[in-house]
Image: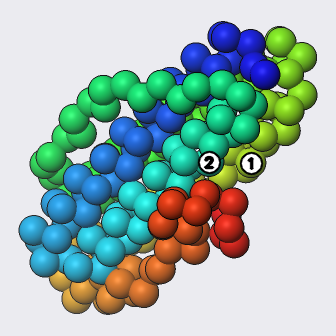
């Protein structure tokens, strides 16, 4: 059982994670239009990661005997100035999500909800990785600058990214993966 304030905040966070998924799907579509298929692959894997984050929270709410309440998801932006711009927006977005996870953690601590606090620790760690990865992409794209050859090399590298998390949630998210 969860306090209502915590259930509501977790449901809000599901909405934010699904928005993140939408945002990265939109970036995947944008980079696909640029024929940067490796970037498109990277962002589509990120879409799956975000849906996994949402589903993990979805199952946690249910495991505590509470109800999942889904809400309207905002439309993401559909155009970007460049792949660099997309990754700068990725980092800015992840910083907002980190703040949101930190606020949730504060709430769990304030209510002395130890189970939720332990559950949220996974997200705190995950956000460090999300920001770090986006920062690396920005640094690499800044190095590449206007060099199309280097951009294509990076595109080829990003084509190799595969989802390391479950993407089929029909049997639950607690399978192998993170
Ligand atoms: Fe769910 O980590 Fe990004 O948003």
Most foreground residue, 134 or 7 = 7
Judge left or right: residue 45 versus residue 133.
Answer: left
Most foreground residue, 141 or 104 = 104
Q: Which mark is residue 56?
A: 2
Whether pointer 1 and pointer 2 mark residues with C-beta atoms closer than 8 Å, the reply is yes
**Quarter assignment of residue 102:** top right
Q: Which mark is residue 16?
A: none
Judge left or right: residue 137 versus residue 164.
Answer: left
Vertical order, 102 against 172 (above or below): above
Q: Residue at x 68, y 18 (%)?
A: 6
Q: Is residue 103 visible?
A: no
Nearest to N terminus: mark 1 or mark 2: 2
**Quarter assignment of residue 171:** bottom right
Which residue in the protein does label 1 denote? Answer: 122
Label 1: which secondary element:
helix
Q: In the rendering, at what x and y percent does residue 22 appear?
A: 31, 47
Q: In the rendering, at what x and y percent does residue 45 appear?
A: 42, 68
Mark 1 sits near ligand 1, with its Cβ under 8 Å away? no
Q: In the rendering, at what x and y percent does residue 56 appear?
A: 62, 48
- Colour treatment of the image: rainbow
Q: Residue at x 69, y 72 (%)?
A: 176
**Quarter assignment of residue 92:** top left
Quarter in which the C terminus is drawn: bottom right
Label 2: which secondary element:
helix
């Amino acid at each position: 059982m969860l306090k209502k304030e915590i259930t509501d905040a977790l449901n809000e966070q599901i909405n934010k994670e699904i928005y993140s998924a939408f945002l990265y799907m939109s970036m995947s579509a944008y980079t696909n239009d640029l024929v940067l298929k490796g970037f498109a692959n990277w962002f589509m894997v990120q879409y799956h990661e975000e849906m996994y984050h949402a589903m993990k929270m979805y199952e946690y709410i249910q495991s505590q005997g509470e109800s999942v309440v889904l809400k309207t998801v905002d439309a993401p932006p559909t155009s970007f100035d460049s792949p660099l711009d997309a990754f700068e927006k990725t980092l800015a977005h992840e910083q907002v999500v980190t703040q949101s996870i930190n606020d949730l953690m504060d709430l769990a601590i304030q209510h002395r909800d130890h189970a939720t606090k332990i559950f949220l620790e996974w997200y705190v760690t995950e956000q460090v990785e999300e920001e770090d990865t986006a920062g690396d992409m920005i640094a690499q794209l800044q190095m590449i600058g206007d060099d199309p050859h280097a951009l294509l090399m990076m595109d080829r590298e990003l084509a190799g990214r595969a989802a390391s998390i479950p993407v089929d949630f029909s049997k639950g998210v607690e399978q192998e993966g993170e």
